[in-house]
Image (spheres, helix red, strand yellow):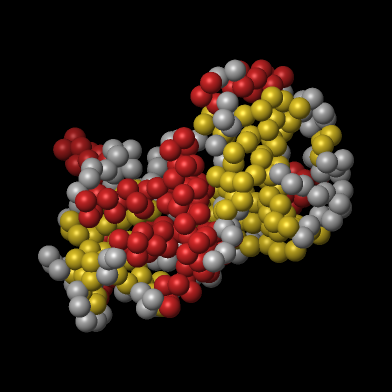
């Protein structure tokens, strides 16, 4: 067959974004994917939250990421013929007097006014949710239906005959100015494998720190939330009385088995603020990619300049993946520089420095 511009390994969030962007550019490519059923993207909430953390800080690059994400997902809604993007407010518990003061300071900061509203003094909202110091509102957040995004992307890629289903065998990749794999020849390979990158021999020196998270779907008939709740746990309304909740940062148990320990802690947390009955509909676990400094990892492998990595999107993948997959393709195709914060060379440079010091 004709030589490809790209082979992409992985059709998770990053791989799917790459695929759509390459289709838009008219590039020749194949995606190789093993249809990993418990990929973290498939069970993620898909939240794009502009203000996070105990200090109520704007998410990194959020003023750039949100407009880009809106345009990206809106175009895909048209292409795929489905709704993917849902604007939503987030009401978050304010846990102390100091937190009230910190939040009000954000409300006076002009750079935050697009995202924050003053604290609501009510201790109980929606009749069933309690907070001693009230609730603050984050506006202009988004929820992306990532599971549907992956499902419809896969269907499109199959229709256009660019998706090859199967496990990528690293030993069969023939290196050189032109890369060969099975019956494919390509100028470049991009590894977008999520946490499976820890098994990739071409990336073995990178400081991946995959973590296991768990997700529970609840049915709460009497809650009727039209916003996302951030309390001891997230509650993300999915419709039909169903709510997503989850968490976990287990760095030791990287199996995909849900645990009784997580479920017990979840029930304790829910009891601390939720005053109504609920039903557990499902409980799943998945391992998500993470990197030492919690930033995306993009760029060429040190010893093979036509082998690239696109990884490390972590829990903020819904906002990071569209922008940074575009950023990577602009680097490869248009010869634009990579942001130092996401360039994989930051880790290779540290390794070289460590080697010299020894």
Q: Position of residue 96 (x, y in %)?
A: 72, 23
Q: Position of residue 284 (x, y in %)?
A: 63, 62
Image quadrant assignment for residue 203: bottom left
Vertical position of residue 220 compared to residue 161: above or below: above
Image point (50%, 54%), residue name: 74
Q: How many marks?
A: 0
* Above-or-below relation of 114 to 243: above
From what the image shows, is residue 356 above or below residue 6? above
Q: What residue occupies the far left of the structure in this picture? A: 177
Residue 57 position (above or below residue 102): below
- Residue at (33% x, 43% y) in the render: 342
Q: Residue at x 20, y 78 (%)?
A: 2
Left or right of residue 132, residue 149 in this image: left
| Among the 4 quarters of the image, the one containing residue 1 | bottom left
Q: Say left or right for 17 vs 245.
A: left
- State the residue in front, 253 or 187: 187
Asked whether the viewer can see residue 125, the reply is: yes
Q: Say which residue appears at 18% left-offset and 56% top-offset.
A: 305
| Quadrant, the C terminus | top left
**Residue 150 in sight here:** no
Residue at the extreme front: 78
Q: Position of residue 204 (x, y in %)?
A: 30, 56
């Amino acid at each position: 067959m004709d030589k490809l511009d790209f082979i992409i390994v992985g059709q998770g969030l990053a791989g799917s974004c790459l695929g759509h962007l390459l289709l838009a550019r008219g590039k020749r490519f194949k995606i190789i994917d093993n249809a990993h059923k418990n990929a973290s993207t498939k069970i993620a909430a898909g939240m794009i939250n502009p203000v996070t953390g105990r200090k109520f800080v704007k998410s990194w690059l959020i003023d750039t990421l949100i407009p880009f994400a809106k345009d990206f997902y809106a175009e895909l809604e048209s292409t795929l013929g489905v709704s993917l993007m849902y604007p939503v407010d987030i009401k978050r518990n304010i846990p102390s007097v100091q937190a009230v003061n910190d939040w009000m300071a954000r409300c006076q900061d002009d750079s935050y006014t697009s995202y924050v509203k003053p604290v609501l003094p009510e201790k109980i909202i929606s009749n069933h949710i309690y907070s001693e110091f009230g609730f603050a509102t984050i506006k202009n957040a988004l929820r992306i239906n990532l599971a549907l995004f992956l499902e419809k992307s896969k269907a499109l890629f199959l229709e256009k005959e660019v998706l090859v289903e199967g496990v990528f065998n690293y030993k069969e990749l023939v290196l050189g100015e032109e890369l060969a794999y099975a019956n494919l020849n390509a100028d470049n390979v991009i590894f977008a494998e999520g946490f499976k990158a820890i098994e990739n021999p071409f990336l073995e020196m990178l400081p991946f720190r995959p973590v296991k998270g768990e997700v529970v779907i609840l049915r709460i008939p009497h809650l009727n939330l039209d916003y996302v709740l951030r309390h001891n746990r997230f509650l993300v309304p999915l419709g039909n009385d169903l709510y997503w909740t989850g968490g976990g940062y287990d760095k030791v148990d990287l199996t995909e088995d849900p645990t009784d320990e997580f479920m017990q802690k979840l029930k304790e947390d829910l009891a601390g603020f939720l005053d109504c009955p609920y039903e557990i509909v499902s409980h799943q676990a998945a391992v998500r990619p993470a990197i030492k400094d919690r930033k995306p990892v993009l760029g060429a492998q040190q010893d093979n300049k036509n082998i690239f990595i696109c990884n490390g999107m972590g829990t903020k993948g819904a906002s990071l993946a569209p922008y940074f997959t575009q950023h990577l393709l602009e680097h490869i195709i248009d010869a634009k520089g990579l942001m130092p914060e996401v360039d994989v060379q930051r880790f290779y440079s540290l390794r070289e420095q460590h080697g010299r010091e020894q």
